[in-house]
Structures are given as C-alpha cells and as structure tokens.
Amino acid sequence: VNANSADLSAGETLLAAVTGQNIYLERIWISAAAAITVTIRAGADVLIGPLYCAANSTVDLILSRQIQLPAATALTAITSGAGNVTIVAQGVVR
C-alpha cells in the first residue's frame, strides 16, 4: 500500500480492515518532509513507534518476522504534526 498526506496528525487509514482476514506486515518505508514522529497502528492501538523522523529523512523497517494485525483491523498511521509524509507498507492479507 502506498499513502501520501500533507497532514497525518489526525490519523489516517493506510489499508482498510478486511472482514474475517488479517493483515500481515512485512516492511514499512517512511519519508518525512518535516521533523515529526510517525506511529503505525493496528486500528487505534500502537503497533510500531513512535518513530522519530528528521526533516527530509527516510525510515526503512524490514521485519524479520511478519507482524499480524488482529482480524478485521485496519492498518493506520498518525503523526505528531503536519508535514508531508509518504508511507509504503508491504505485506499480505489472508
């Protein structure tokens, strides 16, 4: 999934929940234009983070094991403030 936003401070869904299925997260790549923190969530629950990003920086997390989100739970993200952010998440839904 590839998401871009100028302001994630209110939170945003990266991948919607799928009834009866789980999201398995394998990799996350984040690019931030502003000095902010990025938190990856399973619905409203913190999954990873907060990750501290300097202005014009990237963070690349390659997970050695998949992270399984609870069934029918969306993959979401929230930041500590406004600023252009791109998030690329790789994994599977099954």
Image (cartoon, rainbow, N blue to C red):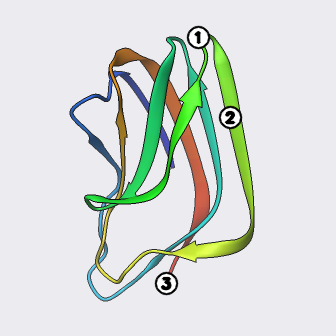
Which residue is at a point 46% across and 35% down the rendered structure image? 38
Regarding mark 2 in the picture, which secondary structure is present there? strand
Which is nearer the N-term, disc 2 or disc 3? 2
* Horizontal side of residue 11 vs 6, given as left or right: left
Badge 2: few (under 14), some or many (20 or more) residues near its Cα, within 10 Å?
Answer: some
Residue type at tag 2? Val
x and y percentages locating residue 81 in the rendered image? 32, 20
Mark seen at residue 12: none
Q: In this view, does 94 lie above or below 83?
A: below
Regarding mark 3 in the picture, which secondary structure is present there? loop
Which residue is at a point 31% across and 75% down the rendered structure image? 18
Cβ atoms under marks 2 and 3 closer than 8 Å: no
Residue that label 3 marks? 94
Residue type at tag 3? Arg
Disc 1 or disc 3, which is closer to the eye?
1
Disc 2 or disc 3, which is closer to the eye?
2
Residue that label 1 marks? 55
Q: Distance between the residues labelled 1 and 3?
A: 36 Å
x and y percentages locating residue 59 in the rendered image? 68, 34
Residue that label 2 marks? 59
